[in-house]
Amino acid sequence: MPLETEARAQIRALVAEFRPEHGDLLAAMHSVQHHLGYLSSEAMEVIAEQLGLFPAEVYGAASFYEEFRFTPPAQTNIRWCSGPACRLKNGGGIRDAILATLGLHDIPGDTEDGRAGVILGQCNGACELAPMVWLEQPSTHRIEFVGNLNAARAVRMARALRDGATIEASIEETKRA
């Protein structure tokens, strides 16, 4: 067993309630990611130890689901809606403008300094706001919807986040004429 570090002890405390052979793998992974923001290799090792699995089994399950991350999340994520209504209203152009502003080439992606990231979102049923994105702050679990975007507003919002603005300030940028 590896040396017990403070991080390992914290992860062990997060998964202490989960038991082997009770179907607790997804719940354990969600618990860790909810508290730490991602699943580190150390976290997957601890989960495996707790549940009597191999770390590869934990990684296999986590890599199957799009929602699990293996690197620390950006300070603020822009979740781009890929639903039909958003696509019909130039959602692809919005996506491309955001990616270009942040210096990214594809989704998912994070800026080098970790201030902003772009991830794929599935339609959330707010089609009256199309085209839209939602801003997520993983550290506080805060989500704000930003709709009726055009490329210029999306660029102002992304630029504000890239430059370290708060979610509120970046939303205000979308309201400027």
Image: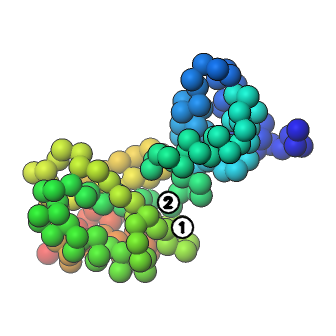
Residue at 33% x, 64% y is 169
Please state if 114 lies on the left or on the right of 124 as rendered: right
Q: Which mark is residue 114?
A: 1
Q: Earlier in the sequence, mark 2 or mark 1?
A: 2
- The residue lying toward the viewer, choosing from 77 and 157, is 77
- The residue lying toward the viewer, choosing from 4 and 25, is 25
Q: Amino acid at mark 2?
A: Gln
Element on which disc 2 rests: loop
Quick check: 173 above or below 100?
A: above
Please state if 152 lies on the left or on the right of 101 as rendered: left
Q: Which mark is residue 75?
A: 2
Residue at 26% x, 57% y is 81
Q: Amino acid at mark 1?
A: Gly
Quick check: 18 above or below 139?
A: above
Mark 2: few/some/many CA within 10 Å (<14, 14-19, 20+): many
Residue 70, x across and y down, in percent? 59, 54
- The residue lying toward the viewer, choosing from 135 and 119, is 119
Residue at 46% x, 68% y is 109
Residue 10, x across and y down, in percent? 73, 37
Residue 36, x across and y down, in percent? 60, 45
Please state if 44 lies on the left or on the right of 144 as rendered: right
Q: Can residue 146 be seen from the camera position used here? A: no
Residue 138, x across and y down, in percent? 48, 50
Q: Are marks 2 and 1 in contact (CB under 8 Å)?
A: yes
